[in-house]
Image (spheres, rainbow, N blue to C red):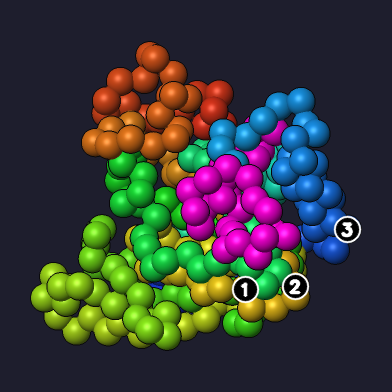
């Protein structure tokens, strides 16, 4: 359970780091499962697996390419990752931050920055990239499978940016990866674009709001930076398609515009009894 001070910190900043949630043994299981999925040794497959840096499937570290391996819905390929998405400590915390009694998975996402060649993830907000669901009330739980530090590409956050609304198309990176806005006049009065690193050690979890500005620079080290983010939907999230998303084919045909988004591909992973 979070303290009131932790909830207030999240409300003010749009993100929160909690202590170690996964034991080292649990992390090792997820690392092994990630390797199996990437080697296509599982019977079931994820929704998507690609080099996010180049928009191409697969990778070749021997060629020193810039690589960020993205896997969407690894839980569909691996029971271990589904169990992780249901982790009681993670889901209870996300539910507290969402002020909800029920959570569903929107989708999960692996982002794996390989040693030396792991590329950057540009400054962005999550919800504008999800043009299928409303309102913008989702919470993401980002669990480190390796120490995510400044030198190997940890996430950076802009405190308070979740209160500035959607800024799709206006975020950019400066020469030193500092966040910038192409039209600052669109921001509310008093908005300060200042970023902070979110250093998350192996087995720790960082939570962030779906409108919080975040990004991560290159991995410049000999160490990998593996992480699993689960994007949780509170009970009231509706199917409201205004664009395309890889999860669109998984929306059940009986779900109509304006309906609560639910179904086998969006399982309930937390429910608090009355």
Mark 1, Cα crowd under 10 Å, few <14 / some 14-19 / many 20+, is many
Residue at which label 1 appears: 219
Question: Which structural element holds mark 1?
Answer: loop
Q: Are marks 2 and 1 in contact (CB under 8 Å)?
A: yes
| Furthest residue in direction top, as rendered | 254
Residue 144 falls in image quadrant = bottom right
Residue 83 appears in the figure: no
Query: Residue drawn 38% across and 84% down?
Result: 175
Determine whether the residue tagged by mark 3 lies in a helix, strand or loop. Answer: helix
Which residue corresponds to mark 3? 25
Q: Say which label, 3 or 1, has the lower sequence index.
A: 3
| Near-viewer residue (33 or 160) | 33
Residue 240 position within the rendered picture, expressed as x and y whole percent measured from the top left: 28, 33
Question: Distance from label 3 to label 1 (Cα)?
Answer: 25 Å
User: Relative to the observer, which residue lies in front, 185 or 62?
Assistant: 62
Distance between the alpha carbons at the discs numbered 2 and 1? 8 Å
List the single residue furthest toward the right. Answer: 25
Disc nearer the start of the sequence (3/2): 3
Q: Which residues are magenta?
A: 50-77
Between label 3 and label 1, give the one nearer the viewer: 1
- Pointer 2: what residue? 223
Quick check: marks 3 and 2 in contact, CB under 8 Å?
no
């Amino acid at each position: 359970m979070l303290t009131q001070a932790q909830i207030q910190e999240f409300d003010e900043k749009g993100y929160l780091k909690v202590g170690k949630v996964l034991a080292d043994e649990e992390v090792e299981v997820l690392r092994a499962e990630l390797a199996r999925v990437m080697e296509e040794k599982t019977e079931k497959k994820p929704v998507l697996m690609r080099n996010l840096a180049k928009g191409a499937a697969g990778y070749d570290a021997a060629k020193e390419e810039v690589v960020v391996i993205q896997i969407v819905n690894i839980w569909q390929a691996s029971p271990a990752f589904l169990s992780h998405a249901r982790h009681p400590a993670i889901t209870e915390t996300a539910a507290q931050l969402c002020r909800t009694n029920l959570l569903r998975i929107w989708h999960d996402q692996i982002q794996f920055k390989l040693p030396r060649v792991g590329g950057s993830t540009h400054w962005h907000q999550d919800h504008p990239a999800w043009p299928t669901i409303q309102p913008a009330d989702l919470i993401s739980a980002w669990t480190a499978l390796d120490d995510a530090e400044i030198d190997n590409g940890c996430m950076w956050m802009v405190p308070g940016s979740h209160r500035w609304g959607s800024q799709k198309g206006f975020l950019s990176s400066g020469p030193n990866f500092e966040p910038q806005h192409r039209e600052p006049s669109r921001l509310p009065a008093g908005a300060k674009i200042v970023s902070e690193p979110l250093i998350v050690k192996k087995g720790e979890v960082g939570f962030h709001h779906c409108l919080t500005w975040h990004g991560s620079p290159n991995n410049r080290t000999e160490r990998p930076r593996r992480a699993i983010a689960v994007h949780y939907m509170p009970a009231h999230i509706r199917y409201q398609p205004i664009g395309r998303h890889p999860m669109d084919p998984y929306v059940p045909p009986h779900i109509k515009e304006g309906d609560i988004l639910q179904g086998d591909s969006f399982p309930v992973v937390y429910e608090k009894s009355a």
